[in-house]
Image (cartoon, rainbow, N blue to C red):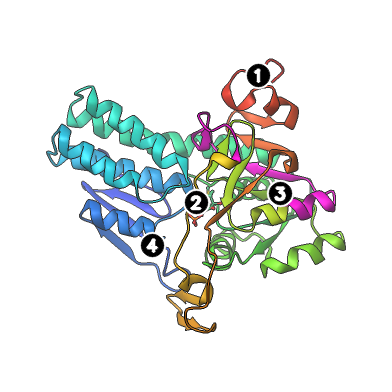
């Protein structure tokens, strides 16, 4: 496998490294991946995160393990462990299916490694295509609201929703971004602000509960978000709080776009109700936990509900921005996500 370099993932001199996103923006520390169990824990703990990047890291690890001499049964066990790391993002399943297929076909270690490299390089190309399609939807001077982190920290390339924002900025559209802080793990406040600052894109951080007030006074022109899994009817799972934004956008007649690569579409999944939703540690809601320290502000053991994602129904989506183009609700109902659309 040749050397590969992304904002939060590196394959260098035959070793895999991930940028520890739990420490951002305070510290940029790279972790050396040395075992399957360690990588699973890094994914579960959100040291490495974002639907595409989780799957790409897992794919590179399988390629690396093949080159280290793991045989068919060992690679199958490695893939099985990685599959269980996080349940909602379907990219992980899709990429590991590709690797398992190569393993089951008796491919050489070099060929299995080449599949992993292709997963990485394909994502870079998919990000570029989505960014171009999505940027065309943004108007000069737009105020864009986004949620969670969907940039180069979450993919091998420019990102999904943040990729669109970056491209619109490069085109000189003079946009401004409202960044939802994204409780409980603050991916917006910690990571999206870090990326937008580095890119020099004007932005303002808000608490999640402030979006309604901004929309009510006309200060949000468009909402763009990413996805962890899109069902074939267009319903999709994304970071908890996304559904609330979609309801608000609908109420205020603000266009609402979801941006994702084809690897996030699950054609086997009929609708949002069939998407598995990850439940996380109650402590994440009882206070804040991170590199900034731990502060638990609720009574100990207070009952907590902590799903990592929610489902946005297709009827609230203005457009699905994929690498192949932008699709409307009627095109999605006509099969745009399964490749059977007659009017796309
Ligand atoms: O729990 P996370 O931080 O992995 O959640 C990430 C998101 O919800 C993103 O919006 C999604 O993965 C799309 S990123 C390209």
Judging by the rendered image, the residue that carries numbered circle 2 is: 152
Q: Is mark 2 within 8 Å of ligand 1?
A: no
User: What residue sits 57% from the left and 38% below the top?
Assistant: 230
Q: Which mark is residue 195?
A: none
Q: Position of residue 68 (x, y in %)?
A: 14, 42
Q: Nearer the viewer, residue 11 or 200?
A: 11
Q: CA distance from mark 2 to mark 4?
A: 19 Å
Query: Counting residues from the N terminus, which is met first, the one under dot 2 or under dot 4?
Result: 4
Q: Is mark 4 within 8 Å of ligand 1?
A: no
User: What residue sits 59% from the left and 30% below the top?
Assistant: 232
Q: Which residues are magenta?
A: 246-272
Q: Which mark is residue 341?
A: 1
Tell me if 114 is positioned left or right of 331 in this view. left
Tell me if 324 is positioned left or right of 39 in this view. right
Q: CA distance from mark 1 to mark 2?
A: 31 Å
Judging by the rendered image, the residue that carries numbered circle 3 is: 172
Q: CA distance from mark 1 to mark 4?
A: 39 Å
Q: Position of residue 172 (x, y in %)?
A: 71, 49
Q: Are marks 2 and 4 in contact (CB under 8 Å)?
A: no
């Amino acid at each position: 496998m040749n050397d590969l370099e992304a904002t939060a993932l590196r394959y260098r001199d035959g070793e895999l490294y991930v940028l520890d996103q739990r420490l951002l923006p305070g510290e940029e520390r790279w972790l050396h991946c040395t075992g399957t169990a360690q990588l699973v824990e890094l994914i579960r703990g959100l040291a490495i995160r974002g639907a595409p990047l989780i799957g790409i890291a897992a794919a590179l690890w399988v390629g690396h393990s093949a080159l280290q001499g793991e045989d068919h049964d060992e690679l199958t066990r490695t893939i099985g462990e990685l599959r269980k790391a996080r349940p909602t993002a379907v990219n992980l399943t899709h990429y590991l299916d590709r690797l398992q297929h190569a393993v089951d076909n008796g491919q050489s270690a070099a060929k299995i490694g080449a599949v992993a490299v292709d997963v990485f390089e394909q994502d870079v190309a998919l990000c570029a295509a989505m960014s171009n399609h999505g940027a065309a939807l943004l108007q000069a001077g737009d105020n864009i609201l986004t949620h969670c982190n969907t940039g180069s920290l979450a993919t091998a390339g420019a990102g999904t929703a943040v990729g669109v924002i970056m491209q619109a900025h490069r085109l000189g559209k003079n946009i401004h971004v409202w960044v939802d802080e994204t409780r409980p793990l603050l991916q917006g406040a910690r990571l999206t602000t870090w990326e937008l600052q580095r890119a020099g894109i004007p932005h303002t951080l808000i608490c999640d509960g402030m979006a309604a007030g901004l929309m009510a006074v006309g200060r949000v022109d468009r909402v763009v978000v990413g996805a962890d899994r899109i069902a074939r009817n267009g319903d999709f799972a994304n970071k908890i709080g996304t559904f609330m934004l979609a309801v608000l956008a609908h109420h205020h007649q603000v266009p609402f776009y979801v941006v994702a690569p084809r690897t996030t579409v699950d054609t086997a999944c009929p609708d949002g109700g069939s998407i598995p939703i990850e439940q996380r540690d109650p402590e994440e809601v009882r206070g804040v936990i991170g590199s900034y320290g731990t502060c638990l502000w609720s009574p100990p053991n207070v009952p907590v509900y902590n799903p990592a994602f929610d489902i946005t129904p297709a009827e609230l989506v203005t457009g699905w921005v994929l690498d192949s183009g932008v699709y409307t609700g009627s095109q999605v109902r006509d099969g745009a996500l399964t490749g059977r659309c007659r009017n796309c």
